[in-house]
Image (cartoon, rainbow, N blue to C red):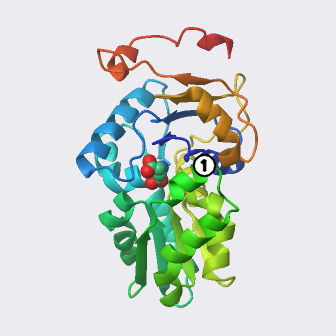
Amino acid sequence: VFDSGLGGLTVVRALERELPAECLVYFGDTARLPYGNKSKVTVERLSLEALRFLSHFEIKALVVACNSASARALDVLQAEAPFPVLGVVEAGAARAAAATRNGRVGVIGTRATVRSGCYERALAARREGLRVIAEACPLFVPLVEEGWIDHEVTRAVARHYLEPLRAGGVDTCILGCTHYPLLGEVIGEVLGGGVTLIDSGESVAAEVAGVLGDRGLRARAPAPGHRYRFFVSDQPEQFAAQGARFLSHALVQEVRVVDQSAVPWYDRWAGRDAVPGEEQR
Ligand code: DGL
């Protein structure tokens, strides 16, 4: 699982429920986040580095948990990877296209995701005639990271951002950013009870289960040494401390920081059998 930081833990939470027997390696690029306000070329470059790093773990599929990276870099990752690469955008769009009754779908995400128009394209490919109202909500990520979930400021910001969706009468809203499922209650409150909220993480977890199943790659029972491993590019302590909020339970595994000095860290990793001390976990 690759994400720009810790928001991807909402996708881990969904994967844990959907695929409890699978091992998982997570990389959160905490040194370089946010991806949500970076250019396509930069998000592509950072995403390719993450792919090269995670490739050293003999993974059978890559889940791009980050909406901004799914929006900007999925095609280059799929072209480079010898295994399936699944992004959150297609999965979320498929669920929303099936869920909407009145054909009006809201999409909220970072600036990078909304500017890319990726959800509009994915929705149009699945169902003709949908009306899509997309709004960037850049303040939501820092509010969630600050822990301001049930907070009057967050409610005021949500009312401001979501007004076009409310006025447009959407009956379905895609939470097109890793952090937004944590704001589900506030967003639901502002949009009104009848609006279906689509969690892209849950959607992609179901898709991963399908892809692994189709290829006969699905683990039936947890393997001996079944484990989750977490790597970040900066501030592992902060990731571990904040992780519980995104996972809905404590993050018990050690969070390790990747070495980014001189030679690119993803190249230096190649050829090493294991991270020192890895075999003990
Ligand atoms: N993970 C990002 C996303 O889902 C949000 C945080 C960021 O901007 O890096 O778009």
Which residue in the rendered view is the most extreme toward the right? 249
- The quadrant in which residue 67 appears is bottom left
Instruction: Identify the image quadrant of the C terminus.
Output: top right
Q: Amino acid at mark 1?
A: Glu
Question: Is 26 displayed left or right of 54 in the figure?
Answer: right
**Residue depicted at 54% across the width and 61% down the height:** 200
Question: Is 205 displayed left or right of 56 in the figure?
Answer: right
Q: Which type of secondary structure does the marked residue at label 1 adopt? A: loop
Question: Is 54 displayed left or right of 76 in the figure?
Answer: right
Sort mark 1 into few (<14), some (14-19) or many (20+) by Cα contacts within 10 Å.
Answer: few
| Residue 157: image location, x then y, percent | 54, 69
Q: Is residue 15 above or below residue 226?
A: below
Q: Is residue 269 visible?
A: yes
| Residue 280: image location, x then y, percent | 67, 11
Residue at mark 1: 146
**Residue depicted at 34% across the width and 71% down the height:** 121
**Residue depicted at 62% across the width and 78% down the height:** 190
| Residue 69: image location, x then y, percent | 38, 49
Of 280 and 79, which appears nearest the observer?
Answer: 280
Q: Is residue 66 visible?
A: no
Q: Is residue 191 above or below residue 239?
A: below
Q: Is residue 246 above or below residue 58?
A: below
